[in-house]
Every structure is written in structure tokens, then in C-alpha cells.
Image (cartoon, rainbow, N blue to C red):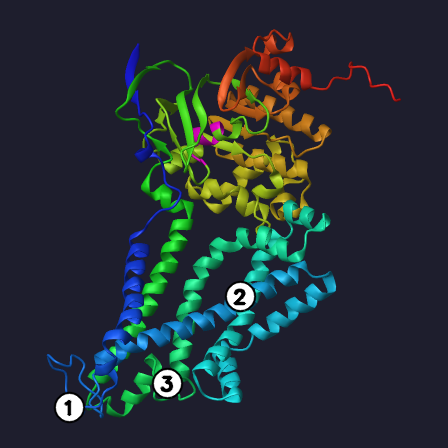
Amino acid sequence: MTNPVTVPDETPTQRARSFYWTFGLIAGLVLFGIILLIGIVAPLVMSHSANALSSHASAPPSAKHWFGTDEFGRDMLARSLVATRLTLIMTAAATAISVVIGVLLGTGIWLAPRRVRELGLRAVEVAVSYPGLLVALIITSIIGAGAVAVVIGIGIAGIPAWGRLTANLASDVSRRDFVVTARLLGVPGRKVITRHLLPNMAEPMLILVASGFAVSLIELSGLSFVGLGVQSPSYDYGKLLIDALPAIYTRPAQVFGPALMIVLTILSVMLIGDGLAAAADPRTAQRRRKHIQIPSAGRETEVRSDSSFVSVQDLRVSTDRGTELLHGVSFTIERGEIVGVVGESGSGKSVTAMALAKLLAEGLTASASEVRVGEMDMLGRVSRRKLATTVALVYQDPGTTFSPALRMGSQLSEVLRTHGNQSKKKARELVLGALTTVHMSSPERRLRQHPHELSGGMRQRAMIAAALAAKPELIIADEPTTALDVTVQAEILREFKRINKDRAVSMLFISHDIGVVEELCDRVLVMNAGEIVEELSWRQLAERDVRHPYTKKLIAATPSLSDPLPVRA
């Protein structure tokens, strides 16, 4: 019996965008655009009202003077708007000094020799320990009061913070292979910074520039307020505040203009910063759409209604930019069956497994005619508790699976305590039983240890034990033996086979090693370029009864002890 299900045709308007415009980002850009426009236009059209003396001295707010006038009869609203240009220019200049010099310092430290790097990092840490505003106050006092002095002071005071931030970001990027290779090839340091380091740090730094701009604005206004910033006859927001301070109790409206402009300017840049952070976070896109989308209008396909424990039909996975990674993958897994997925790196094996477990990487979306595990319809909402106790995952690298800061006991029992409603004592007992099942030596001692105290094989056994403790019905093993030596690989494979036999657990076993799949699996799916190109039984694979050219190439590429060794020249 079949049921018609529709699969959506992809159109350009349906593709996920790589940049997501949040309401906060739009509001911040609009507000800052208005403030920037005021800074450009106000000095051109309102300078007379802002600077000309009149007979309306100390006038209260009125229809003609919304915020009243100062003691010289100058309109306070006009002065607040005219002050925007100088305030923005000074703030941008101070921020630019801090960012440019700080970024050069932070990246230069990581390109310097080891001794220089260590001394540089210590010096930056010492400099950061001093409050930036205090440093700016001292520098401005030494140079002398004025707009240029306060900009230089605040710019220099912000350099250590940006230097440390950039050094922290560069510490990761500078260790990557493409940077190490560039340095070994003799690429000049300037080009290493501009071509390799900065492009890979631009996103978080751009977000933080917004908060740096806001801090610089506050510090500039503060120093002008205490008399070290802008001097008469020029004025910025801080200068207007200090000039209006004597009349704050009798004419409080005079303070309202510059105070409101400071608040609105800071609010706009903070909204922009938060919006950029949200747009850069792939989870923002995921909150707008589900990982697995229920198909709607479009072409029709048939969905089998069978008794298989796992059924995946016409699974398609795409990136944010609309690039399709999986092209209509379909397969089933029976209860107690081990199905292997084999193929070269990039063929779509892991993406298929993660889509089945509803654990697609951020920035990926999937659609399908059917994705079912037991009675769970993975196209709809699935209880986290049900999912966590039905499907278990064993990842490729046991060294990165566990948190190095926590002991094994708390990590192995987390699912049982969170989703299994087990007490700490009961969860510990179940984990100990699972560790014993996978033949872990001294299981009680292992629970008190940290991950780095276990060998690679022990960590992999611990991961399998964590999966077994919840008594799952399906285990998804994503290349679980790749990071292990050959002897440990054999032991782990025997554990999988024994677990399958003793507990009748279904398994989806992913590997690029045909030999491993041949020994373990009942049925094998061969993947290439996001498609299943051939399905084989273990016997067909063992007898090399294959038809697809890609499968033949995989088998031919598998080394064998019977192959003749090349003769040395």
C-alpha cells in the first residue's frame, strides 16, 4: 500500500539565505542612518540657531524651542543635533586607532618568534589590567585638553583590549595548516595577516567593533564632561552636558537633548552589533525553519508503508546557499540488522546519518518523503526524551566527544539523568553495568577519571557504553574505528557484533573501509556524491559480486596482503 506524498520543488525564493536580517539589525541600521544623516545635515542648516546669540536667554521649552535655550539664548535642540557631527567623527577616529593598532599588534604577536610572542602576550595582559578610562585620562592630561588629545588618549587606551582580543582569535587561526604552510613557503608577514588571518577573524571582530564604538562614545563624552575633551567654542555631547549642568535643577530640559542623543547613538550601534551576531549565528536560521521539513506542494512521489524499523525515503539535504548535498537517498533498516554505509570522504555518509538522527550541522536543512524510526515520525516533532532513549550515536573521534573538564562519570550518565529520570545513584549503576558489558577494565575507577586519562580504545568503549546505557533500539556509528589502531579496531568491532547479537539492536555503521563493513554488516549501501549507487548483501560484497563502476573502484583501492609488492628500482 502506498500513500502519495508531495516533495517541494526548489525555487530561488525558497532557498535559505546566507545572511539573516533580524528586526534588531534593521532597527539599528535605520536609527544609526538617521543619526548619521543628522550629523551631515544639521551643521549645514541649523548652525545659526545653534550658535547665534539671542534675547531669549534661558527660555523654557516651547513650540519654537523644544528643549529651551541656554543662558545665551541658543537653541538646545539645534545644538544637540549640530554636536552629532563632531561626536561621531571623534568616536570613529578613537575607535579606528584602537582597532587598527590593536589588530596589528595582536596578529603581529602570533607571527613573531616564540620569545617575542610570549613577552608580547604578557605585556598586553599587563596593559589590559589597567582601566581604559583611567589610561585615557592620564594621557589626555599629559597631552593637554582638547578634541585631538582626547581622541588620541581614548584610542591608545583601547589598544591593549583589542590587541588581546585579536591575539586570542589569531591563536587558533595561526595554528591552522594553511597559515603554517604559508609561513613555511616564505609568504611575507603582511600578506599572511591580510590574506589568511584577518579574513578568518573578520566576523567576530566586526561584531565587536560596534560595542567598541559605544564604549568610545561614552568615554569621549565623559572626558568632555570633566573638561578634558572638546573646548569652547566647539562642542560635543559631553560638552553640552557640562554646560547645562549648573541649570539642571531649574532648566532640566537643557540636559535632555545631548543625553537623548547619547542614548540613541549607543542604542543604535548596540542593536547593530547584536543583529550582526545573530545574523552570523547559524542557529538564527534554524529557529526560522526546521532541520527536517514536511514537504508541501510540488511533484508527487510514492512512500512505502512497510514493516522496516527504520525507513528513509527521498532524503535531500541542502546548505544555506541552496547547494544540495544529498540527492534523494532512500534505504531501510530491519530490527536487529546492521546496515553499513561505505564511500569515500565527502560522499554524504555522515550527513545521511545526522539527518536520520535529527542532528544536522548548523546551516543545513533537509526534506524527505519519509523519515521514520520505529513509531517515531522524524518529520514532525519528536520528544527529546523518546529520541534520546531510542537513537544512540557513536562518533568518529572519542578524543573530542567528551569534555576534558568533566569526569567520565557525570558525562556517561547525563542522558540517563536528563531523559531517563534516573537518580544519580541509579544512573551510575546502569553506566557501570554498561562499562562492564563492553569489557572496560576497572569501570569504577574510570568513572572518576577525566577523558585524557583514558586511552583511545577506552574512550571509544566508554562512548559505546554511554550509548548502551539508555537501551537504544538504533545505534548510529559514524566511523567509530577510524581514530584507533588496528588491534583496538578489531576489539571494538567485536563489541558491536556482540551487542547486536545479544540485544538485537539495529545499527547504521558508517565507514570508508570496505574490509570493516564486510566483516560486520548484514547489508551494505555504497554512496558517492550524495547518492546511493549500489546496495549489496554481505555475501555479494565478500564474493565481489558488484556491478557499479564506483563500487569496483572502491574494492580495487582496498589494499590486500595478497597483492604483490612493488619491485624497487
Q: Is residue 28 visible?
A: yes
Residue 493: x percent and y percent?
Answer: 64, 25
Residue drawn at x 55%, y 20% as measured from the top left: 340
Distance from Cα at disc 2 to Cα at disc 1: 47 Å
The answer to whether the residue labelled 3 contacts the one labelled 1, judged by CB atoms less than 8 Å apart, is no
Q: Earlier in the sequence, mark 3 or mark 1?
A: 1
Task: Examine the image and state in which quarter residue 331 appears.
Answer: top left
Instruction: Tell me: residue 453, above or below residue 511.
Output: below
Q: Nearer the viewer, residue 138 or 480?
A: 138
Residue under pointer 2:
100
Write down the quadrant of residue 120 in the picture: bottom right
Task: Residue at 55% x, 55% y: name it.
Answer: 198
- Image vertical order of residue 88 relative to residue 511, above or below: below
- 322 in magenta: no
Q: Where is mark 1, residue-wise?
A: 56
Report helix, strand or loop for mark 2.
Answer: helix
Question: x%, y% of residue 262?
Answer: 31, 74
Q: Which residues are magenta?
A: 352-360
The quarter of the rendered structure image containing the N terminus is: top left
Q: Is residue 346 left or right of residue 565?
A: left
Reading the image, the residue beneath label 3 is 225
What kind of residue is marked 2?
A: Val
Residue 55 in the image, given as x and y percentages of width and height:
15, 93
Residue type, mark 1 in image: His
